[in-house]
Image: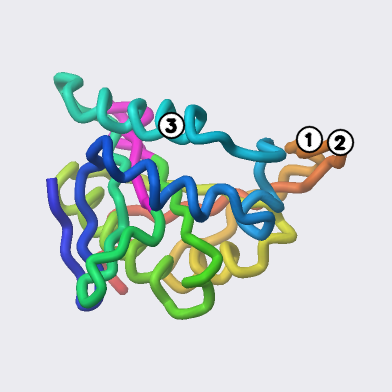
């Protein structure tokens, strides 16, 4: 599967992608809001294998795609959509980027593309996401793609011994079409 934007190519993962993922998942900035304290090559290979296995599921309900910079042919992160309820047509999205590429609009571009795929191809009615409330950059991405904050979950995540609040965001199909 391939999605394309102005600057990005988003495609299914392949086994050799682990090396690029390992580079950014080993970065302390990336790990800040993660449960992981460090990553090993084995951890990342298993992480990638989950996405490869999901590609074979029928029906396919999870699409986690590698984000590739077109010009450099460089893997810089991943973005995905997971159908939570086929009957209710509800899914959630998520994304992560190599910190080296933060602040350049790539997360927003990828998230917009995955939303479009969710509404146009998967025919979802509601797509939601969440983020740690202190992750201001992620909050901005979710708001830029038209999602509205539906909830503030206090002390929802215990990460490395500290409780964090979460924000819950969502967008409905008719809201997305109106944008």
Across and down, in percent, residue 85 comes to 34, 27
Give the mark toward the camera: 2 or 1.
2
Q: Say what secondary structure mark 3 lies in.
A: helix
Above or below residue 146? Residue 104 is: below
Mark sitting on residue 161: 2
Q: Residue at x 48, y 46 (%)?
A: 22
Mark sitting on residue 116: none
**Disc 2, disc 1: CB below 8 Å?**
yes
Query: Which residue occupies the foreground of this view, 178 or 100?
Result: 100
Across and down, in percent, residue 39 comes to 59, 38
Q: As drawn, is 26 to the left or to the right of 78?
A: right
Would you say residue 84 sits in the magenta stretch? yes
Q: Tell me the distance, in whole angstroms, between the alpha carbons under discs 3 and 1.
A: 21 Å
Q: Which residues lie in the magenta part?
A: 78-91
- For the residue carrying disc 2, how many other residues have a C-alpha within 10 Å: few (<14), some (14-19), or many (20+)? few
- Extreme top residue here? 58
Label 2 or label 3, whichever comes before in sequence order: 3
Query: Which residue occupies the foreground of this view, 53 or 152?
Result: 53
Mark sitting on residue 47: 3
- For the residue carrying disc 3, how many other residues have a C-alpha within 10 Å: few (<14), some (14-19), or many (20+)? some
Q: Say what secondary structure mark 1 lies in.
A: strand
Quadrant that contains the C terminus: bottom left
Would you say residue 105 sits in the magenta stretch? no
Q: As drawn, is 20 to the left or to the right of 9?
A: right
The residue tagged 1 is 158
Kindly indicate the quadrant of the structure image that contains residue 38.
Answer: top right
Across and down, in percent, residue 12 comes to 21, 43
Q: Residue at x 46, y 73 (%)?
A: 144
């Amino acid at each position: 599967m391939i999605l394309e934007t102005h600057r990005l190519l988003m495609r299914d993962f392949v086994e050799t992608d682990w090396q690029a993922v390992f580079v950014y998942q080993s970065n302390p900035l990336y790990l800040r809001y993660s449960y992981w304290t460090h990553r090993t090559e084995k951890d990342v290979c298993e992480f990638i294998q989950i996405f490869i296995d999901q590609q074979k599921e029928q029906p396919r309900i999870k699409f986690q795609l590698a984000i590739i910079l077109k010009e450099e042919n460089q893997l810089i992160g991943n973005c995905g959509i997971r159908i939570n309820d086929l009957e209710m047509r509800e899914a959630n999205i998520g994304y992560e980027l190599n910190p080296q590429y933060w602040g350049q609009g790539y997360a927003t571009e990828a998230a917009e593309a995955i939303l479009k795929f969710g509404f146009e191809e998967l025919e979802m009615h509601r797509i939601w996401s969440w983020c740690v409330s202190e992750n201001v950059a992620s909050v901005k991405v979710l708001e830029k793609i038209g999602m509205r904050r539906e909830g503030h979950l206090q002390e929802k995540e215990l990460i490395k011994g500290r409780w964090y609040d979460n924000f819950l965001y969502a967008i409905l199909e008719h809201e997305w079409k109106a944008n």
